[in-house]
Amino acid sequence: MTRHAPAKAASTTVPVHPLLAERWSPRGFDREHQLGDEALTALLEAARWAPSSQNSQPWRFLVTRRGEDAHGRLFAALGPGNQAWAGAASALVLVAARTAADDGGPQRWALYDTGQAVAALVTQAQADGLSVHQIGGFDTAAVRADFGLDSTLTPIVILAIGRRDGTAELPEPLAAREAAPRARRPLGDLLLLPAAAESVPTAA
Ligand SMILES: Cc1cc2nc3c(=O)[nH]c(=O)nc-3n(C[C@H](O)[C@H](O)[C@H](O)COP(=O)(O)O)c2cc1C
């Protein structure tokens, strides 16, 4: 067990907004912090106003707060590595996307749109002094069954939301990860170069 107070702002080639640069995904959360109704509603409002294909708004949220029965059920679905820290967060929120229409037809942009809604929620949380750690490591089948999600809904992530506690004690290797600098690929790796003109097929 170690104590830490990491400074983990993104290192960027030019400045970006502090809300983006200073966001990161902690595992140390304040076990005493409660997520009040207004704070929670601000996060959901931020998500609600995200853009989406044809304004379809396919995101759905199952909100549970620490101490509630449903919170315990969602927590039980987390993988062991995530259970080691996520219970201290003030809320666990299941994010699902409506990936099929009522007639069963696919909703092509549902996952993309839902990710955007979560990004808005995460940024609002950062602005409000809260932290969000997204969790893909959970049993989606168990969650689907336990919470009665119908076949049009795809569970995607569970959000651990709360107030970061830089002094929270974490088991290794999580404590080391909490203190480690954040890393990203260099910007150049993200850029696709246009194909050379001679390799582009010409129209018949
Ligand atoms: C879809 C998704 C699933 C993730 N699943 C987990 C997870 O199961 N456990 C975990 O500790 N972190 C998880 N993360 C957090 C990522 O590991 C983290 O965002 C990434 O390492 C970058 O770190 P940063 O958010 O601090 O910049 C997940 C993030 C996303 C977006």
Image (tube, rainbow, N blue to C red):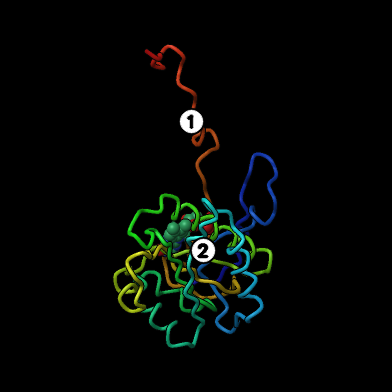
Which residue is found at the position 56% from the left and 57% from the top?
119
Q: Is 190 displayed left or right of 13 in the figure?
A: left
Give residue 94's position: percent from left, percent from top.
Answer: 45, 71
Q: CA distance from mark 1 to mark 2?
A: 32 Å
Residue 181 in view in this figure: no
Q: Position of residue 190 (x, y in %)?
A: 50, 36
Left or right: residue 13 compared with residue 170: right
Residue extending farthest front: 103
* Amino acid beneath label 2: Glu
Q: Residue at x 60, y 57 (%)?
A: 8
Image x and y of residue 166, in percent: 59, 70
- Mark 2 Cα shell of 10 Å, populated few (<14), some (14-19), many (≥20): many
Between tags 1 and 2, which lies in front? Answer: 1
Q: Mark 2 or mark 1, which is nearer the start of the sequence?
A: 2
- Regarding mark 2 in the picture, which secondary structure is present there? helix
**Left or right: 167, with 83 as reference point:** right
| Closer to the camera in the image, 155 or 107 | 107
Q: Is residue 123 above or below residue 13?
A: below
Label 2, on which residue?
A: 178
Q: Quadrant of the C terminus?
A: top left
Residue 132: which disc?
none
Q: Amino acid at mark 1?
A: Leu
The residue carrying mark 1 is 192
- Mark 1: few/some/many CA within 10 Å (<14, 14-19, 20+): few
* Residue 164 location (% of width, % of height): 59, 71
Q: Is residue 26 above or below residue 116?
A: below
Depth order, front residue of 66/38: 38
In this picture, is 88 found above or below 140? below
